[in-house]
Structure formats: C-alpha cells, structure tokens
Amino acid sequence: MRAKKALIAALLALATTLAVDTSANAAPSDTPARACTRVIDLKALPAGTNLDLVNQAARSLGLAEVPTVLSGACNTSIRTDAYHETTPYPGRGPVVLREDEYAPRQQYCTDSVSVVGDTSIPGTDLPPMHGLIVFASGCTDEPNPLLV
C-alpha cells in the first residue's frame, strides 16, 4: 500500500513538472506573431540540402545563432493569444510563426531577423518564397494557444 502511494505521488510530481515546463516554453502574450505561407523546420529538411547558404544569409542579416526555422511570406500580423491584440513585429527579436492564425501548431522563436524579398531554400525543390522572409533561432514547436 505504501509503495502504491509513493508511485502515485511520483506520477503526480512528474505530471506537475511537465505542465510547468510546457507553460515555461509558451510564447509571452506580447510576442509578435506572423502568419506565413510557409514555416519550414530547417532541422527536418531532406538530406543533401545545402544549409550553408541559409546560415550565411541569416548571419549577414545579424542572426546570432544558426537558424532553425525559415518562414516565407510572413506579411500578416496575427494575435499571439486569444486575449490580446496583434503586436507589431519590428523585423527582429522574439517572434511566433504560424501558417495562419488558427493553425494547430506554431513556432515560438526567441530570436529572429527578417528581410523583404524572394528566396528559395538552396538544394531543395521548394518554390521561392515572396514577401517578408524570417530567419529564426531558438525555436520551440508548441500548440497554438488560440485553439486551446
């Protein structure tokens, strides 16, 4: 009986820890959010993709770390959560990237840089992306809080 109570207590402590970690990774409500035609996880690209050119472009724009997400056509401001209005994106810094306002998942990135233009991912068959292009690092994939 004592072992069963200890196991239940351990499971409850683990569940509490996981809940705290999830909320700690959630984007703050004042983080700018952008709807993008494409949100690409650079860690999941096909083998043989030439990421050196992507890294060079991000570095030349001032991104301190290697980008982990690249998004294109991020021309529309959207709400970060259901309780706040949109926050302007200054073109760099923390950002939330979603394929649209009500996409099931989002990328919360702690740093980003952006440029207006056209580009394609080197070494892939992806079509060029037009408009605001965002190179982001420190990204966490999380559920969209508008749908929770």
Image (tube, rainbow, N blue to C red):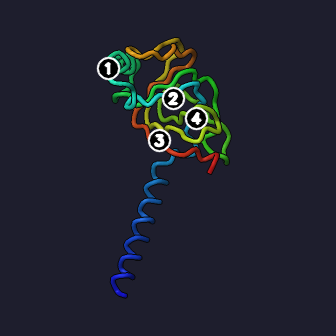
In the image, 106 versus 136, the foreground residue is 106
Could you give the CA–CA distance between mark 4 and mark 1, rounded to whole angstroms? 31 Å
Residue at 38% of width from left, 16% of height from top?
Answer: 57
Q: Earlier in the sequence, mark 1 or mark 2?
A: 2
Residue 110 placed where, x, y %? 44, 37
Residue highlighted by disc 4: 33
Residue at 53% of width from left, 22% of height from top?
Answer: 72
Quadrant of res 18: bottom left
Q: Few, some or many C-alpha atoms within 10 Å of disc 2 (few <14, some 14-19, many ≥20)?
A: many
- Which quadrant: the N terminus? bottom left
Foreground tag (4 vs 1): 1
Residue 105 placed where, x, y %? 55, 41
Could you give the CA–CA distance between mark 3 and mark 2, rounded to whole angstroms? 11 Å
Q: Which mark is residue 141?
A: 3
Residue type at mark 1 is Gly
* Element under disc 2: strand
Residue highlighted by disc 2: 39
Q: Are marks 3 and 1 in contact (CB under 8 Å)?
A: no
Residue highlighted by disc 1: 48
Foreground tag (3 vs 1): 1
Foreground tag (1 vs 2): 1
Residue type at mark 4 is Ala
Q: Earlier in the sequence, mark 4 or mark 2?
A: 4
- In the image, residue 95 above or below residue 52: below
